[in-house]
Amino acid sequence: MNINEDFNSPPLIRGMGLGSATALNMIDMIGVGPFITLPLIVSAMGGPQAMLGWVVGALLAVCDGLVWAELGAAMPGSGGSYRYLKEIYGPRGLGRLVSFLFIWQLSFSAPLSIASGSLGLAQYAAYYWPGLEHRYAVLNGIAEIPLLGHLEVSALVMPGTFVAIGTCALVVLLLYRRITVIGQLSKLLWVGVMGTMGWIIFAGVTHFHAQQAFDFPPGAFTLSSSFFQGMGAALLISAYDYWGYYNVCFLGDEVKEPGKNIPRAMLLSIAIVACLYLVMNISILGVVPWREVAEAGHANSKLYVVSVFMERAYGPWAARLVTGMVMWTAFASVFSLMLGYSRVPYAAALDGNYFRAFARVHPKHRFPYVSLLALGGVAALFCFLRLADVIAALVVIRILLQFLVQAVGVIVLRVKRPDLPRPFRMWLYPVPALMATAGFVFILFGRKNFGKELRLAVFILILGLIVYLVRAWREQEWPFVRTAA
């Protein structure tokens, strides 16, 4: 049964052109990530050689972006990976399980992603009001899971926590409207993002000290085990910073000429953002000593490095102004993330592979309002977690349960469906898909203490398998389909 017809829901509007799609991708990619993760990535690698993390991360983003570009152009529609995985692995067979597991992990990873932007905004707000970082309570939970070991969860209760929750609520309120209005709003947010990046780069170039920026510690490039472990941790963070280039794929039903605009929006946003990241972060390290930056990363507090940077360059007035601009950028990222991800449970529900309520479309403004409200509520709960833990859990869960199976899947689809129309074909096929797979595996296993997040991701995978099998048994779906005697 077509659930969309059951609810008499009108189709979505193709009102987003290349400009709006690229703007949404860029504000999703930039967000608060590069403004708050520089201390984390510098502390991970122990010096300004951390810039390698952003270079390698950009190459990984291009390789994986080509995977998304081919799939997004061939199967334009709301849902993104849900639609791709189902088609790749068979809509009536294994693909039903794999696509369900994607929606299952999204129930965790999408709110984590939104919460990371909201927490980043609260971190910068602490530059104005230091009391926001006062800890009322720290809650630690440990659970022993057979075969997996112990799972650890830490929660913080601070005034800044409620700033982050309020950010989620405000974004839901703004998104509760028609997509054509949202497209115009995304361009306005994009202007704020580009203005922030431009000012930071200008300040860095005009106050740049090369000797300080390239003050590498002894053995910085020695190819030791510590170097590769540092690179693994740095690549995890840079992957988080670049992610968002695929956001347009979740809005395929609302993009004009998707066969052309989806690949173009992704590749344009990756190229532009990669250049901005490298120039901006080198500029900051040319003003603020890397050891001071690394200290903030180790402490996981006072991560508002851009505010400190502007204070050194121009004085307190500039620091206060740029803090507000970074908060604007963080808000824009949360806006873009919640917009894109709210369409995925909607697409799965239309297909009968998720709760039916998520297929409901607002009768007047024609957007999936139940999906939007649920996503915002779960993201608000995740705002009680530590920012560093949110980022690590988000990246590992998504790599294991989405990106790896999709990078392999684009090759599987070429073999199974060579006749499928592909308006865009991956350059140098299959090299980018293989390189993306290798990069994701390195992130999973190339870091110190990689088991903490990996155990959590495997636990979520096992729970998802159980939920799917129980549901499939009740509904007599694959692999419990009844056959005629």
Image (cartoon, rainbow, N blue to C red):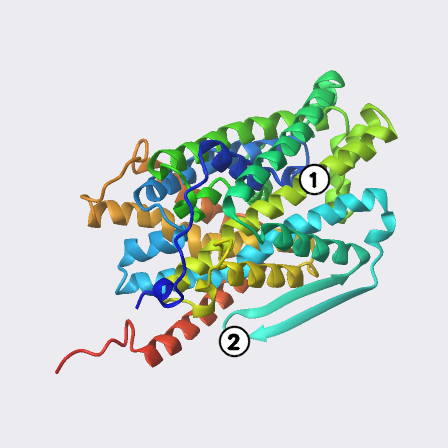
Please provide percent x and percent y for residue 67: 37, 41
Q: Quadrant of residue 390?
A: bottom right
Q: Nearer the viewer, residue 162 or 278?
A: 162
Circle 2: element type: loop
Q: Which residue is mark 2?
A: 146
Neighbor class of circle 1 (other Cα within 10 Å; few <14, some 14-19, many 20+) is some
Taking the spot 45% from the left edge, 33% from the top edge, the residue there is 18
Q: Amino acid at mark 1?
A: Trp
Q: Nearer the viewer, mark 2 or mark 1?
A: 1
Q: Position of residue 288 (x, y in %)?
A: 77, 29
- Which numbered disc, 2 or 1, marks the residue that appears first in the sequence? 2
Residue 128 occupies quadrant:
top right
Q: Going by the picture, which residue comes out furthest to the bottom?
A: 485
Which residue reaches farthest left? Answer: 485
- Residue identifier under label 1: 328
- How far across and down, in percent of the image, does residue 407 sit? 37, 47
In the figure, is residue 364 to the left or right of 31?
left
Tell me the quadrant of the picture where the C terminus can be found. bottom left
In the rendered image, residue 218, in percent from the top left (x then y), is placed at: 68, 30
- Count the marks: how many? 2
Q: Is residue 353 left or right of residue 332?
A: left
Image height of 404 relative to 39, above or below: below
Whether residue 122 appears in this view of the structure is yes
Res 243 visible = no
Q: What's under tag 2, amino acid-wise? A: Pro
Q: Nearer the viewer, residue 342 or 146?
A: 342
Farthest front residue in view: 364
Direction from residue 309 to residue 25 in the image, left or right: left
